[in-house]
Image (spheres, helix red, strand yellow):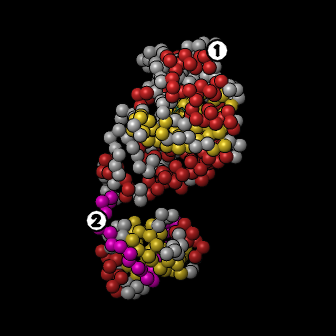
Amino acid sequence: MKNEIYIEDIGQFKDKEATVSGWLYNRRSSGKIHFLMLRDGTGIIQAVAGKNDINEDTFEKCKELPQESSLKVTGLVVEDKRAPGGYELQVKKIEFIQMSEDYPITPKDHGTTFLMDHRHLWLRSSKQHAIMRIRHSIIRACRDYYDTRGYVLIDAPIFTPAACEGTSTLFETDYFGSKAYLTQSGQLYMEAAAMAFGKVYCFGPTFRAEKSKTRRHLTEFWMIEPEIAYCDLDGNMDIAEEFIEFIVQRVLEERKEELKILERDTSKLEKVIRPFPRISYDEAVKMLKDGGLEFEYGNDFGSPDETYISDQFDRPVMVHRYPAAVKAFYMKADQEDPTKAMCVDVLAPEGYGEVIGGGQREDNLDILLGKIKEHQLPMEAFDWYLDIRKYGSVPHSGFGMGIERAVAWICGLKHIRETIPFPRTISRIQP
Ligand code: 4AD
Ligand code: MG
């Protein structure tokens, strides 16, 4: 079986006969004409079926045709400036493939829980289409960025023997009688790979047993993680800002229509141009205090703090040198103030919070050993990781960007759950 044509290519068939295979998106009728809105995944076209143009039986069937019935419509492609997409189909023949039953998602307002329960169907609607297409563009842009700059793609494993990002959010599984965990990050493996290839990246699903319900957290999310040998914190920030500028500008070029469907204020995205401001944790804390926010020095920033800080700028802001105590064990200590870590979080504008986390890694064997002990991590699980510091240790850095955080921000979505086809959260593993 072969699809005759796709709606996005319909212009090539102007004044010719074509067959569109799709689903009924919507329908209205005047006594003598049916207007069928057909969708095929690539677009929507209006098919106009006049009583005198098609056989009587077909015309009668169209009267009752349920939403999302599958059908093949053959007709003449005519240009019509008023029609969505600029063309309409003057129907000659309809082949009904399957009559849908009462489709649960109608143009009326449904609550989010209902829509999420029907996520497998909800993906057919135009807003979800726009989001998924933008997600696709973002992922392609991410890959293009590294692929065209000499990075080697090195896939990280999903089953891991130890925590990378703290033991409180580990998903544990039974691995032939011993414990394994779903990966929280490919970073540790990328560090090994960077020593083999110079600059590398991985892109894959990562897992966190996030016990709180927030607008920013999924339990399964996709992360792209570059890692670069002979790169310090400043170099890392240079890459992060160029990377973010690249993907945002790519989406603006490629996905105008989709951003319009989402009613995204694109003037905000147009401002995402290097250089981004770089401020230290200390400077960020001062900003909070000056703004009258209550904040205890030494803590990590919460969502309202991040929002306040990012609201001071019109482009992403890079906050570096957090207290080491609130960051992961592998962070390199700042030479000038060892209580600080050589890390960076990139906070997106408009209150979207952290989209990137990363930094320079501890490259000294003894200090790293001390950190693993301090964090009470199982030393045996890190034997291999310590080898990286024994055999040609060099300064190196990297970061991770959560794809869904980036999609939420670029699409302007309030909640992260719509940024991934089938979201997994503390309260949802269906459908
Ligand atoms: O800041 P995080 O925890 O950093 C790491 O995992 C590093 N090992 C990455 C590295 O240096 N290679 O997570 C990185 C990013 C966050 O900035 C955020 O965008 C996203 O991953 N993220 C989440 N996205 C959705 N749901 C969650 N629960 C997330 N946790 C982190
Ligand atoms: Mg982080």
Q: Is residue 290 left or right of residue 12?
A: left
In the rendered image, residue 86 lying in the magenta stretch gets the answer yes
Q: Quadrant of residue 172?
A: top left
In the rendered image, residue 364, in percent from the top left (x then y), is placed at: 64, 19
Amino acid type, callout 1: Gln
423 and 161: which is toward the camera: 161
Amino acid type, callout 2: Asp
**Which of the two discs, 2 and 1, sits closer to the camera?**
1
In the rendered image, residue 277, in percent from the top left (x then y), is placed at: 62, 28
Q: Residue at x 64, y 36 (%)?
A: 193
> On residue 143, which mark appears?
none
The mark total stands at 2
- Tell me the SS state at disc 2: loop
1 and 120: which is toward the camera: 1
For disc 2, the marked residue is: 102
Q: Residue at x 52, y 78 (%)?
A: 18
- Neighbour tally class for label 2: few under 14, some 14-19, many 20 plus, Cα within 10 Å: few
What is the distance, in whole Å, between disc 2 and disc 1 at their CAs?
66 Å
Q: Residue at x 59, y 25 (%)?
A: 386
Q: Is residue 418 left or right of residue 281?
A: left
In the rendered image, residue 86, in percent from the top left (x then y), is placed at: 53, 68
Q: Is residue 86 visible?
A: no
In the rendered image, residue 43 lying in the magenta stretch gets the answer no
For disc 1, the marked residue is: 335
Mark 2 or mark 1: name the one nearer the start of the chain: 2
In this view, 320 is above or below 69: above
318 and 209: which is toward the camera: 209
- Region of the chain picked out in magenta, as a range: 82-106
Q: Residue at x 48, y 30 (%)?
A: 162
- Neighbour tally class for label 1: few under 14, some 14-19, many 20 plus, Cα within 10 Å: few
